[in-house]
Image: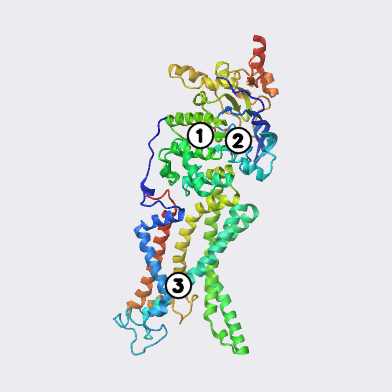
Amino acid sequence: MTITPVNLSSTVADDEPPVSLWRDAWHRLLRNKLAVAGLAVVILLAFVAVFGPWLTPYDFLTQDLEARNQAPSLAHLFGTDDLGRDVFSRVVYGTRTAFVVAIVVTTIAVAIGVTLGAMAGFFGGLFDRIVMWFTDMTMSVPNLLLVVVINASLKTPITAWMEARYQATLNPFYRETIWVDFLLVFGSMALISWPPYARLVRAQVLSIRGRPYVTAARALGLTNRLILMRYIVPNAIGPLIVSVSAGLGTAMVLESAFSFLGVGVNPPTPSWGNMISDGLRVWQHYPHLLAAPAAVLGLATVAFSFLGDGLNDALNPRGSK
Amino acid sequence: MTAPEIQKPLLDVRGLTIEIETRRGPAIIVDGINLTVGKGETVGVVGESGCGKSLTMLSLVRLLPNKIKVKGGTAEFAGRDLLKMSKSELRQVRGGKIGFVFQDPMTSLNPVMRIGDQLCEPLIYHRNMSKADAGKRAIELLRLVGIPGPEQRITAYPHELSGGMRQRVMIAMGLACDPELLIADEPTTALDVTIQAQIVDLVKDLRKKLNMSVVWITHDLALIAGLVDRVAVLYAGTVVEDAPVGELFARPTHPYTRGLLASIPKLSDERASRLSSIGGTPPEPGRRPKGCPFAPRCALAESICHERVPVLEPVAGHSGHRVACFVAQRQLKEAA
Ligand SMILES: Nc1ncnc2c1ncn2[C@@H]1O[C@H](COP(=O)(O)OP(=O)(O)OP(=O)(O)O)[C@@H](O)[C@H]1O
Ligand code: SF4
Ligand SMILES: [Mg+2]
């Protein structure tokens, strides 16, 4: 019997043959320069977010009224703001805010979206229709409008209640309005962020469920659990990971947009958004107050998006060159 | 070519009927198929696209898509009715006793899994092999199906192999647990002609080596002429003729079979083949004619053909040859 020549692409012809999908994906990711750059920036920012307080020369609240609105210098890398606070330190603390918001919001949104989407795709029928109806509804309302409405209608009563509790108990916890901020920001952002994940996962499950290789796996007698874990999930997860990575960047932009509109994290908690919003008022005179937070926000978004694209290619062995 | 001696068939399908749920209500797709496959026998199932070949085979291991259901009949495999057995028993049959090879090797392998891992899966699951043993067996299987350098190839992803190689991998998967029956659903349709012949040769070779029964689905009678012992001709979800392969080629009896054979292109006689190819299209599900399903396209159709459904009956004097046609049966009797 004659043997046909085999079209052997170079992908696996690596020094040491990796054994799993994930390790292969990792190897492929490392070969993608943009993705590696994105990953490096993300890691750096994450490091800054975690260890920020030990990295900054100043506290983000310390005001130095002698040194207001200074241009960048060695003493103040990104200069100082109108209260004489060190902008570099505030950007660093803002990184922490951005990561906390992005991670918490994306986690909640992904949890809701994946659960509802997978169930809708799997069960179909009425449940599917209800979930999709909610999804469409949520997606048809402009995001910012929804968030503004939620904040406007909930923030005042909650704050009033907290103040009342404080008056009654004198427990200083009730004066920490930062928690209310976070709760409302997280809640409303998660509420507008889950529908795309639900749609994505539903579409994935629907299309993969009927693929010939799933039928072939069934014909091999494999159990549903095995088929789900080895055939459906790995094929569905690529797009999800991509979308989560991009979603983290989007959440940071969203948080900034909300802060900018005054419905996000409130001062004095530093967030890139409220720094940008402050900076915009005076940018003609002190451009560094706008440039520093805006540049970091832009960098973070681009990094997450490159990383997402790289992950997409890496997780899809067919797409690799 | 003679069929091996058949006592009790390995697979005995009787009156298998399959329905599809449509907007206009249920419609019959497969209408009372009878099919037997003996131990060690290779049966070709031939018919036009859409005549129900794939659904028949999928229904045996209960893998029909949603909205398509078995409505009647039995399918005994080694004495047990596949259509009634428990889910766990069925899972032992799938991949363990009945191996499948699917039509499209491009989409029937999991794109994100190395072919070695995919081959190991049934071995670990059905044979309780350790990962290391399964890996060794996977290499053996790849060698068995003629894949060069199997030690390196087990780490390849499906997209790194050519179509023919992928189909060999699919065959290896079908064979992994030494099935008693291999069902190959148009395994060569997606491949080019020279590779088709190689795959046919491979299965021919393996069938002997492994002593298994094979059902080979195709719409290309010529391709499998040298491979199969017997041929069942399907039309619109029924078996219209069933005969040992030599007998079928020598004495095609059903008008549809004759049309099929005549439409096999012969280089020497191109005009004749074009003249005798069958006009018209098979009935759509839900629009089956009342009598013989072939009647609207049949040149020999008589009034009885539009009234009653012909059943598969032996062709007198030719053992193992059965045909479902009023006119053919009458002509045979007149000739005798
Ligand atoms: N998933 C499905 N949904 C709806 N109808 C289907 C489905 N699968 C098959 N059918 C219909 O059932 C009939 C028989 O299909 P089947 O796949 O068994 O044909 P086949 O003989 O294998 O054809 P082919 O040679 O093209 O593979 C066809 O008319 C087809 O339209
Ligand atoms: S039964 Fe009648 S219509 Fe059917 S194939 Fe025979 S001759 Fe044609
Ligand atoms: Mg088919």
Q: How is the image coloured?
A: rainbow
Q: Chain of mark 2?
A: B
Q: Which residue is mark 2?
A: B57
Discs 1/3, front: 1
Give the image location of residue A52, x and y in percent: 41, 77
Could you say whether the residue bearing mark 3 is in a helix, strand or loop? helix
Give the image location of residue B194, x and y in percent: 42, 29
Q: CA distance from mark 1 to mark 2?
A: 13 Å
Discs 2/3, front: 2
Q: Which of the two residues, A167 or B209, is positioned nearer the viewer here?
A: B209
Could you classify mark 2 by the number of other residues whose Cα lies within 10 Å: few (under 14), some (14-19), or many (20 or more)? some
Could you say whether the residue bearing mark 2 is in a helix, strand or loop? helix
Q: CA distance from mark 2 to mark 3?
A: 56 Å
Viewed as shown, does residue B222 lie left or right of B327? left
Labelled disc at residue B250: none
Q: Which residue is mark 3?
A: A98
Give the image location of residue A177, x and y in percent: 53, 82
Q: Are marks 1 and 3 on the same chain?
A: no
- In terms of image quadrants, where is residue B314? top right
Three-letter amino acid code at the position of disc 3:
Ala
**Screen quadrant of the C terminus of chain B:** top right
Viewed as shown, does residue A259 lie left or right of A159? left
| Tag 2 and tag 3, C-beta contact below 8 Å | no
Q: Which of the two residues, A189 or B127, is positioned nearer the viewer here?
A: B127
Three-letter amino acid code at the position of disc 1:
Pro
**Screen quadrant of the N terminus of chain B:** top right
Residue lying furthest left: A74
Q: Quadrant of ligand 2?
A: top right
Q: CA distance from mark 1 to mark 3?
A: 55 Å
Q: Are marks 2 and 3 on the same chain?
A: no
Q: Chain of mark 1?
A: B
Q: Which residue is mark 1?
A: B187
